[in-house]
Image (cartoon, helix red, strand yellow):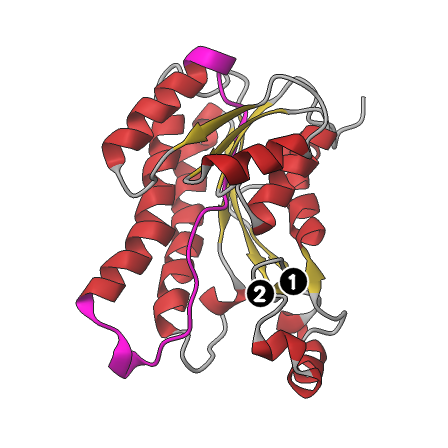
Amino acid sequence: MNPFSLEGKHIVVSGASSGIGRQCAISCAAMGARVSLLGRNSERLQQTLSQMDGTGHRIYVVDLTVEEDIKTTVQQIVKDSGRISGLLNAAGISGTLLMKSVSGKKLDEFFQNNVYSAYILTREVCRMGHFAQEGGGIVFFSSIMGSYGETGKSLYAMTKGALQAATKSLACELAPKNIRVNAVSPGLIITPINENLPHITDPSKREELERMHLLGLGKTEDVANACVYLLSDASRWVTGVNLYVDGGYTAK
């Protein structure tokens, strides 16, 4: 059997309504998984669903900043589709803000969306009776900014660094259940959301960004392929790792 196959696995993907999360859902389905898609927008989740191969996929409209909603949604997912074999925590927010512009409210917003929601969703997925008895994989979405500095990225970077730290400790905690916990740290990925932004459309600025990534800028498929690996049996001996998917940004 192909060790990279997800045949027979039930994968939960948060942030599945757009960008990298959408591509992860599409790629997991292409590799044979049944996928439960989580997001805030029903219409965009339906758009993701329409691009997916296979059957048995379901969508769940949920606000991941509301703890009680996470609990009830995970319970419903397990009731509808059975135990969970893997979780991709792709939901989150980004932004560039100088420290002088960061308010306490903005701190709460970033940590709520990028850290607390992923942690609580992971906790609920790992509750007794929710995760597959044979184990599986959990993936947090960090960023190169969690390890490397850049002006205006301190707030975003703090949240992504927190996920890297959680990955290592949770890998230790969940190993007895044969649940692997890893993170992916993408570089600059071109998505429908950012492809029309000035730093992408301006030729000189884009050229500078491409120079920072030895293999050029990334596609959503590049990150999705890494996630498929971390969810598959091919990564059965990999846990506690932060996998850079950055086109060589961190090699310099």
Residue 152 locus on image (x, y percent):
40, 79
Q: Is residue 97 rendered magenta in the image?
A: yes
Residue 142 locus on image (x, y percent):
49, 56
Residue 230 shows up from this direction: no
* Residue type, label 2: Asn
Separation of marks 1 and 2 at Cα, in angstroms:
6 Å
> Which residue is painted at 71% across and 22% down in the image?
54
Mark 1–mark 2 CB contact (< 8 Å): yes
**Magenta range:** 79-104
> Which residue is painted at 80% across and 27% down in the image?
2
Residue named by callout 1 = 190
Name the quarter where the C terminus is drawn: bottom right
Structural crowding at the residue carrying mark 1, measured as other residues with C-alpha within 10 Å and reported as few (<14), some (14–19) or many (≥20): some
Residue 75 locus on image (x, y percent):
36, 19
Up the image or down, 186 lies above or below 87; here it is below
**In the depicted view, which residue is nearer to us: 93 or 147?**
93
Specify the label residue 194 is tagged with.
Answer: 2
* Residue type, label 1: Ile
Q: Is residue 221 rendered magenta in the image?
A: no
Residue 215 locus on image (x, y percent):
76, 69
> Which residue is painted at 62% across and 58% down in the image?
191
Of tags 1 and 2, the one toward the viewer is: 2
Residue 141 shows up from this direction: yes
